[in-house]
Image: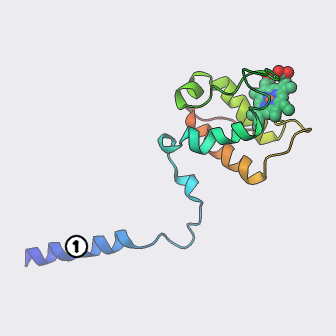
Amino acid sequence: MRTAVVLLCWAALAHLASRPAPADDKKPADDKKPAETVDVQKDVYPFLRKHCVSCHNDVTGTAKPSLTGFQDARAIRKDGDIWRAIIKLSASGVMPPANRAKPTAKEVDRFIRLAPRLMEGEIDRK
Ligand code: HEC
C-alpha cells in the first residue's frame, strides 16, 4: 500500500514537471538566461563587431577606447566603467554615431538586456 502511494506521488510529480509552461509566460528565452550562461562570443560581442569595432579598434584607432578586448567576461569585469559606457551609449543611440547605419531596435534590445549580466551588480541604464 505504501509503495502504491509513493508511486502515485511520483506519477503526479512527473506529470506536473512535464506540463508546458503557462500560456501567459511568453518571455523570450533570453530573459531567463542567468548571467553565467550569457556567452560573450555568441550573445554580446557580435553586436560590437558589427556596429562598433570598425572605429573602436587597435589598428585604425579611429576612436577610443578600443573595444576589441571585450571578448570574454573577465575582460568585461576588469573594465566595468567602459562596459557601462558601452551599454549606455548603445541604449541611448548615441553610438554608433549618426553618420553610421543604426543597429535595429531588436539588436539593441538584445544587447542591452544581455550585456549588463556580464557585470557584477546592477547598473543604471538611464
Ligand atoms: C563611425 C565611427 C564610430 C563607430 C562605428 C562607433 N563609435 Fe564610439 N566613438 C566614436 C568617436 C569619434 C568617439 C569620440 C572619442 C574619440 O574621438 O576617440 C567615440 C566615443 C565612444 C566612447 C567613449 C565615450 C566617452 O565618454 O569617452 C564609447 C564608450 C563608445 N564610443 C562606444 C561605442 C559603441 C558601443 C559603439 C557601437 C554600438 C560605437 N562606439 C560605435 C566613433 C565611433
Instruction: Report the quarter where the N terminus lies.
Output: bottom left
Q: Is residue 110 above or below residue 8?
A: above
For the residue pair 85 and 126, the one nearer the viewer reads as 85
Disc 1: which residue: 9
Single out the residue that lies furthest toward the front. Answer: 59
Image quadrant assignment for residue 84 = top right
For the image, the number of numbered tags is 1
Q: Secondary structure at mark 1?
A: helix
Is ligand 1 closer than 8 angstroms to the Cβ of mark 1? no
Q: Amino acid at mark 1?
A: Cys
Q: Is residue 102 above or below residue 71?
A: below
Measured as percent of width and height from the top left, residue 42 is found at: 58, 44
Measured as percent of width and height from the top left, residue 96 is found at: 82, 37
Measured as percent of width and height from the top left, residue 124 is found at: 69, 35
Q: Residue at x 56, y 33 (%)?
A: 121
Ligand 1 shows up in the quarter that is top right
Measured as percent of width and height from the top left, residue 29 is found at: 55, 58
For the residue pair 3 and 39, the one nearer the viewer reads as 39
Q: Residue at x 35, y 68 (%)?
A: 17
Q: Residue at x 54, y 73 (%)?
A: 23
Instruction: Report the quarter where the C terminus lies.
Output: top right
For the residue pair 38 and 56, the one nearer the viewer reads as 56
Q: Is residue 12 left or right of residue 105?
A: left
Image quadrant assignment for residue 118 = top right
Q: Is residue 116 above or below residue 19?
A: above
Label 1 crowding class (10 Å Cα cut-off): few <14, some 14-19, many 20+? few
Q: Residue at x 48, y 44 (%)?
A: 37
For the residue pair 12 and 109, the one nearer the viewer reads as 109
Single out the residue that lies furthest toward the left. Answer: 1
